[in-house]
Amino acid sequence: MLSRRHLLALGAASSLISRRAATAAEPLKILFVDTGNTGRSLMAETLARDLATRRGAPVAVISRGLDVDPFDEAPEANARVLMADRGFDVSARRARPVAAADVSHADLILTMTRAHADKLIASFPQAKAQTFTLAFYAKGSEEPIPDAWGKSMLAYRDVVAQLDRLLPLALAKAVEARRSDTAPMARSSTAPGRPSGRSVE
């Protein structure tokens, strides 16, 4: 069972999404965040965009990294292969660092791990109310999506399996929050993901 704090946090996020994406002409804007923007967040963006298109959901998605390596901006090879297997060519995509404009325009920010959420909130405190890990937002409990960089194809397949399971839940919840007219339930200070001083994973 979710704690009262977690329920309030999800309620606050739903309220924020509903208020910020109030009109049908304005798509719901979701920002996916990880470390380097060459694997997890890139695949989350790609799969979420396809899912939204197939569902006819008014959703716009982007992805960014918290520690982008300017010397290594190309998609990870295994991620590129797995996305190609789904019919998506991400070979020309280049990693981009998260910027203030990305955060200010996002209705919902979904990170791959709690450490990512902590670091993003430390850099952009104003984003606390709309920042969650993907797993927590999707199902109300934490489930880190591990970094597969440098690992076998099996590790990348495991990441994609997590994304396939969590993204439909998160997208459905976000779209429903957009449709609803939920009244504010909590201040943003109740949202999870307070800076803990941990390094990004």
Image (spheres, rainbow, N blue to C red):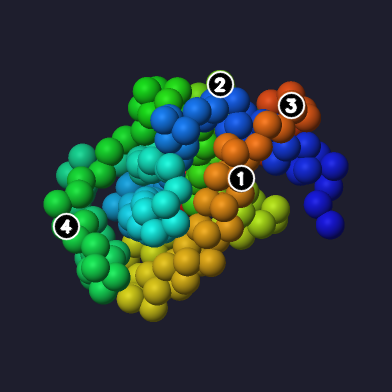
Image position, residue 97 (x, y; %): 32, 35
Q: Given contact means CB atoms under 8 Å apart, are the residues at marks 3 and 4 in contact?
A: no
Amino acid type shown at disc 2? Gln
Which residue is nearer to you in this view: 108 or 153?
108
Q: Quadrant of residue 6?
A: top right
Image position, residue 178 (x, y; %): 58, 37
Image position, residue 120 (x, y; %): 50, 33
Disc 2: which residue: 126
Tell me which label, 1 or 4, sits earlier in the chain.
4
Q: CA distance from mark 3 to mark 1?
A: 15 Å
At 47% from the left and 71% from the top, the residue drawn is 161
SS for tag 2? helix
Q: CA distance from mark 2 to mark 3?
A: 17 Å
Q: Is residue 26 above or below residue 167?
A: above
- In the displayed orientation, state which residue is furthest to the bottom: 154
Disc 4: which residue: 91
Disc 3: which residue: 184
Task: Using the rendered image of the protein, determine whether residue 166 is visible from the camera's viewpoint.
Answer: yes
Tell me which label, 3 or 4, sits earlier in the chain.
4
Amino acid type shown at disc 3? Pro
